[in-house]
Image (tube, rainbow, N blue to C red):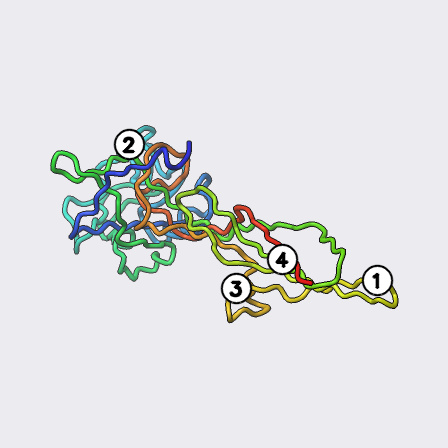
């Protein structure tokens, strides 16, 4: 369904409240989460930790803190009843991998503290102070993940290329082609507005009756344009999480963790080409 069909417009961002989003990974930042690696227990955010992120789960069903319960039923009593230094800490005596049990000393601050210096945070990315995730109902701030979601899109570097085919010239002169991107309808993107110029010079030899075509240096509409920075790419930037409204509906994306849309998406949405011919 179109994105705009799922926009929730009555969201609020109460003052004095901070909502942070954390993206964790085991293999690589953009690796799909649909399979476990052979060394899943000791990779990425799992390194040296008793709480493990997996696709299939570890340990005996219903006994391990890392087991999938087989339904929507949550796995209870994983952490201690009170926070330790402001963050949850694993409860002692719970199975977490094969015959190993938790020792009650591991804090989960590396998952939830933006300022954590734990070594595992190198496998985590933090987005702080997200807006527009709550609704006000009957005097309470609410977020219903059964009805709404916010999607985290971090994939970057998707490029498309376009060719113009053959150029045909019938007269000598300077030819300038102005190329701009045609903005699409995706509300999550800010489309590129830079201008690209393709320049050709056609010279005639009256004695020989032939023409020569010279492609001059492509140009960008900036005074600092160089051969290395000539505006060849049109980069569309995902709007920041603070600017995006909450979306509603369902998705099959793996990380529905209540965040915003961030990162870069470099795509070609289309072009408008205008030609000037100067004699």
Residue wearing tag 3: 221
Whichever of callouts 2 and 3 sits on the residue coming sooner in the sequence is 2
On-image quarter of the C terminus: bottom right
Residue at 59% over, 53% down = 274
Marks 2 and 3, how far apart at CA = 48 Å
Residue wearing tag 2: 146
Whichever of callouts 1 and 2 sits on the residue coming sooner in the sequence is 2
Q: Percent position (x, y) of residue 43?
A: 42, 51
Residue wearing tag 1: 210
Marks 3 and 4, how far apart at CA = 16 Å
* Secondary structure at numbered mark 4: strand
Whichever of callouts 4 and 2 sits on the residue coming sooner in the sequence is 2
Up the image or down, 98 lies above or below 122; here it is above
- Which is more foreground, mark 3 or mark 4? 4
Marks 4 and 2, how far apart at CA = 55 Å
Up the image or down, 202 lies above or below 242; here it is below
Marks 1 and 2, how far apart at CA = 71 Å
Q: Is residue 269 left or right of residue 3?
A: right
Contact (Cβ within 8 Å) of mark 3 with mark 4: no
* Secondary structure at numbered mark 2: loop
In the rendering, which numbered label is found on residue 276?
4
């Amino acid at each position: 369904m179109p994105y705009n069909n799922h926009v929730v417009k009555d969201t609020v961002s109460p003052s004095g409240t901070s909502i942070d989003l954390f993206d964790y990974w085991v293999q690589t930042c953009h690796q799909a989460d649909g399979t476990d690696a052979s060394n899943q227990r000791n990779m990425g955010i799992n390194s040296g930790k008793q709480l493990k992120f997996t696709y299939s789960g570890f340990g005996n069903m219903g006994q391990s803190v890392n087991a999938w319960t087989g339904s929507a039923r949550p796995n209870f009593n994983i952490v201690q009843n009170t926070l330790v230094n402001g963050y949850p800490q694993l409860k002692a005596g719970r199975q977490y991998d094969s015959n190993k049990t938790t020792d009650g000393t591991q804090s989960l601050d590396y998952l939830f503290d933006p300022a954590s210096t734990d070594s595992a945070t190198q496998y985590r990315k933090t987005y702080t102070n997200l807006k527009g995730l709550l609704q006000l109902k009957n005097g309470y701030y609410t977020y219903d993940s059964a009805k709404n979601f916010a999607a985290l899109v971090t994939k970057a570097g998707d490029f498309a290329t376009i060719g113009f085919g053959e150029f045909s010239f019938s007269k000598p002169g300077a030819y300038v082609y102005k190329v701009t991107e045609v903005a699409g309808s995706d509300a999550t993107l800010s489309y590129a507005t830079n201008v690209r110029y393709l320049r050709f010079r056609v010279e005639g030899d009256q004695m020989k009756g032939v023409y020569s075509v010279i492609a001059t240096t492509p140009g960008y509409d900036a005074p600092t344009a160089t051969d290395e920075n000539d505006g060849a790419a049109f980069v569309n930037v995902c709007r920041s999480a603070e600017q995006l409204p909450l979306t509603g509906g369902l998705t099959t994306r793996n990380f529905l963790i209540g965040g915003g849309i961030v990162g870069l998406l470099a795509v070609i949405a289309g072009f408008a080409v205008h030609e000037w011919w100067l004699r």
